[in-house]
Image: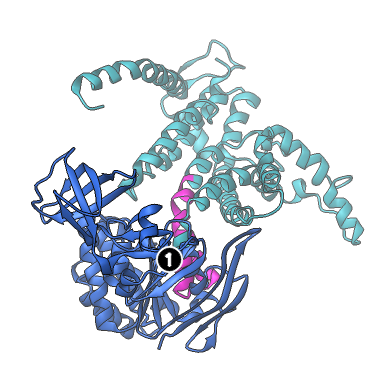
Chain colours: A cyan, B blue
Amino acid sequence: MATAHQRTLARFMVAPSVVLLLLWMIVPLAMTLWFSFQRYNLLMPGMEEFIGLSNYRYFLTDPGFWTALTNTLLMVAGILLISVVGGVGLAMLIDQPIFGQGIVRLLVLAPFFVMPTVSALIWKNMFMNPENGLFASLARAVGAQPIDFLGQYPLLSIIVIVAWQWLPFATLILLTSLQSLDSEQVEAAEMDGASAWARFTHLTLPHMSRAITVVILIETIFLLSVFAEILVTTNGGPGYQSTNLTYLVYSQALLQFDVGGASAGGIVAVDPRQHRGALPDAPDRQDAGLRGRTWHAAFPIRANGSSPSSPGRRPC
Amino acid sequence: MGRITLENVRKAFGDVEVIPGVDLTIEDGEFAVFVGPSGCGKSTLLRLIAGLEDVTSGRILIDGQDVTAAPPARRRLAMVFQSYALYPHMSVRKNIAFPLKMAKMPEAEQQRRVAKAARILNLDSYLDRRPGQLSGGQRQRVAIGRAIVREPEAFLFDEPLSNLDAALRVNMRVEISQLHNNLKTTMVYVTHDQVEAMTMADKIVVLRAGRVEQVGSPLALYNKPANKFVAGFIGSPNMNFIDGEAAARHGAHSIGVRPEHWRLSTTEGAFAGQVGVAEHLGSDTFLHVDLDGGAHVIARASGEFPVSHGDRIWLTPQDDRVYRFDKQGLAA
């Protein structure tokens, strides 16, 4: 885009999509904001009125709120930990020249193509079921008492299920980054007397740091709104043990029919994500290009498509 | 001390034999240059010495010690790569100190050696920059710095100047030669550029298809090439070869005359021809001449030789400067 003329033209060309995206964002956000200040319960039609911040007060003092917030953060942190550490390990493994490399890589990526509901159901019924799940059979085979994973460790189970789905994504991004590592640098380090571990910590990890950041950012955005896996497996229970913010908003709107409260919850849940989203450009201006792009590509869709505010929007 | 000996070293990648068997000795303190066209196996040979590739058979000795199976770090060699292979996330200081850190050297000694290398290579003011902020020549210097701090037995250079522009290449060539004079450490240098080979080497090893064609000092190779390949490769512009009857007159299958060994005349001589392109370099003029027999030769004339395109010209080789080759291309 060299000349002023070209720049003007470019602006006109991108304008339609920008306007469309903006409307796509602004309209639902505005409606959610509007509902969050209303008494709006589907069980009491015709009683809608402006009630100020009451919805927010009720949502924030809800006995489930703090549990849900903690669960959300634990879930994100746990899944990130598993998928980044596991992803680095897997990426390094399948970067080795082995027979059937293409098939192995395809298999590693497979979980990413399975729908969240389906994979959660598979885990629930085929692996974690205390009667006829695989884990139960294994436990019985060694004479141990089968564990009811979803009943006893609901949050951990969901973390495992979602981590299983996201591991391929992390592996894919990290593998790409690993493959771009200059082999002469590795050889230079070898000549410099660096052990395999030293080469990993001094060369491979720093080289992958950018890719790891990308993985963390993208996954965080998606993981803050984990929903299907909870709905299919534990329904947020027992009690609030596996309820996250998204699920709490859903239960407000569609189980208690409180659209106003759910909207307030949606706004509350959107807020921390805005902060997360603002992070990526700050640490290193140089690669704002890459990071900014992935973030902008992912964020608007998630924040407004199937974000916490969407269950709240659904009744209207 | 760094005396490197290769004993019947072979290297094959699968079925492809890149080095069919090389015997070579590089004396301590020598500047040896491996030169040859691309794909001749010179880089592979260097990587075998470095330990970055395993030999298929044969032995590599450094100071009489068999290092054939030793990992690269144990061979006490330092290498400068074509891409420099600097660690991009580390400052220049950390890059240079990296081998010392890996050797668990005390911090103070590390700093002392880094400072010394930086002084030798004029890097003092760049120590806290990242490689990405340096120019090509500076990166090259950092790569050399990283090699010299280890005080290795020998330096290996893998086409280190090929990413630099022409002017810088000449500078770095001189600097590396000077470095060799100061350190007196064995250096093995790989290049496809015969000018680099001629100007820097104590000993040139000419390679073709993994075979050593000739080993010798630059002038020995220039004056007494063992075969047609070496004769054609060493010297710039390339030697002119003339086959057939004219060669038979000299009792050879083929004769070679270097462009600088023609006597030129506009009236008489051994070979007559027509001037094609004349390249005026100021100090010299290179004349591309189409001889009447059909051969195409290059002749060097002094800066102001008064001919132009299409003129008739006569060339006579200096008698003691005619190289004779037999049917197999060997010097007769």
Q: Position of residue B232 (x, y in %)?
A: 36, 59
Foreground pick, A257 / B304: B304
Where does label 1 land, which residue?
B227
B17 relative to A131, above or below: below
Q: Position of residue A315 (x, y in %)?
A: 58, 17
Q: Write the start and end of the magenta stretch as one range.
A: A187-214
Q: Quadrant of residue A250?
A: top right
Q: Position of residue B127 (x, y in %)?
A: 25, 68
The chain letter for the residue carrying disc 1 is: B
A134 relative to B98, above or below: above
Residue A207 part of the magenta-drawn span: yes
Q: Quadrant of the N terminus of chain B?
A: bottom left
Foreground pick, B5 / B235: B235
Residue A180 part of the magenta-drawn span: no
Q: Quadrant of residue B274?
A: top left
Q: Determine if residue A261 is in view.
A: no
Q: Determine if residue B255 is in view.
A: yes
Q: Quadrant of the C terminus of chain B?
A: bottom left
Secondary structure character of the magenta stretch overall? helix
Q: Which residue is drawn at the image coordinates 50% and 31% (left, top)? A: A302
Packing grade of label 1 (10 A; few <14, some 14-19, many >=20) is many
Q: Position of residue B180 (x, y in %)?
A: 28, 78
Q: Which residue is drawn at the image coordinates 67% and 37% (left, top)? A: A230
Q: How many marks?
A: 1
Quick one: SS at disc 1? Answer: loop
